[in-house]
Amino acid sequence: MFCTPQLAARIDRAEGRMCAAMCKAMLADALALPIAGGIAVYGGDDSPTNKLIGAAFDDEAVETECLANIEEQFAARGARLQAEVSTLASPELHALLASRGYRPSGFENVLGHPLTTDFEPVAGVEVTPMLPTESSLFADVLVEAFANPDTGGVGGDEIPPSEVIRRWVLLTSSMPGFYGMIARVNGQVAGAAALRFDDHIAQFNGAGTLPRFRRRGVQTALLRARLAEAKRNGCEIGVVVTQPASKSQQNVQREGFSLLYARQLLVKEAPAG
């Protein structure tokens, strides 16, 4: 699947809107600051959605004054600013951030799947929509799965503490436009995954398999169930973000996802003191 800068902009900006919605639901004075078509979001000291994303596509130059204002607002809160910059964005953005003291901290891969075929369920794994009464169960599964990650991969974000993951999973699962799914093997809960729709893009927002059920097709079942749900809802593409060379990337590529582009993570640390 070939990705244009226009498609990359849609994907990154959809993620920016998702982060802004989550932050506003969590924090009364959350930041959502526009910048060159993208957005910079702050939702609290420990928010995994704090980032600058979606900027400098479509020949939209980043104004230094605008960036400086965003940096000042993050610094006033004692927060570092992480820019997630697509390889399909303007090269001038990378240069500008480097000149302002941002340091490289890792990479993410963005992969996509065109929703043009049918998706068969995996034998032995039942995937059902999360019921309103299952939000706590959903969070339990993802917290345990994320606390025990499959090893491998290069770079990427650090895994937040379990209590932070739980808080944000519960918040996410309660927001409009999100779909939670739970996988079971022989009636036992084995994994969970989230899905969100935005601008005909299906965002695959985290998935995890409990350690004792790994290598049994649970992740494949959750992928196919979400792809099928996205197609039913009229989406054009399913999108997942992974750590480079990770088990997650291997899993999604095995199911027909292809690499669209990468993002470099560039961080400006909070001022000391």
Image (cartoon, grey):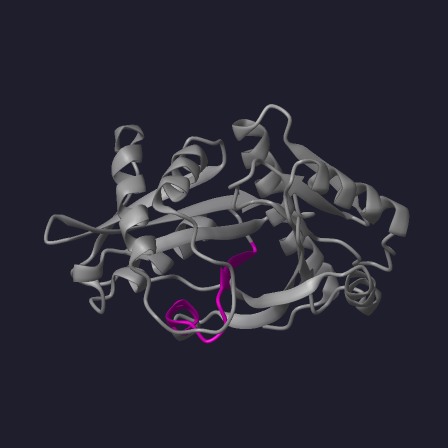
Please give the name of the residue rendered at 44% of the width and 38% of the height, measured from the top-left corner.
168
Give the magenta range.
236-252
Choose between 89 and 75: the one closer to the eye: 75
Give the side of residue 72 with respect to residue 188, left or right. right
Residue 171 percent across, percent down from the top left? 44, 33
Quarter where residue 253 is shown: bottom left
| Left or right of 154 in this view: 186 | left
The residue lying at 31 percent from left, 34 percent from top is 135
Q: Please say whether residue 180 is one of the residues in the magenta stretch.
A: no
- Locate residue 64, reporting x and y percent: 88, 52
Front-most of residues 117 and 103: 103
For image coordinates 42% across by 52% down, the residue present is 206
Residue 184, compared with residue 44, is above or below; it is below
- Location of the C terminus by quadrant is top right
Q: Is residue 261 above or below residue 131?
A: below
Answer whether residue 237 is visible to the viewer in this image: yes
Q: Is residue 239 magenta?
A: yes
Observer able to see residue 115: no
Asked which quadrant contains residue 213, the reply is bottom left
Answer left or right for 271 relative to 164. right
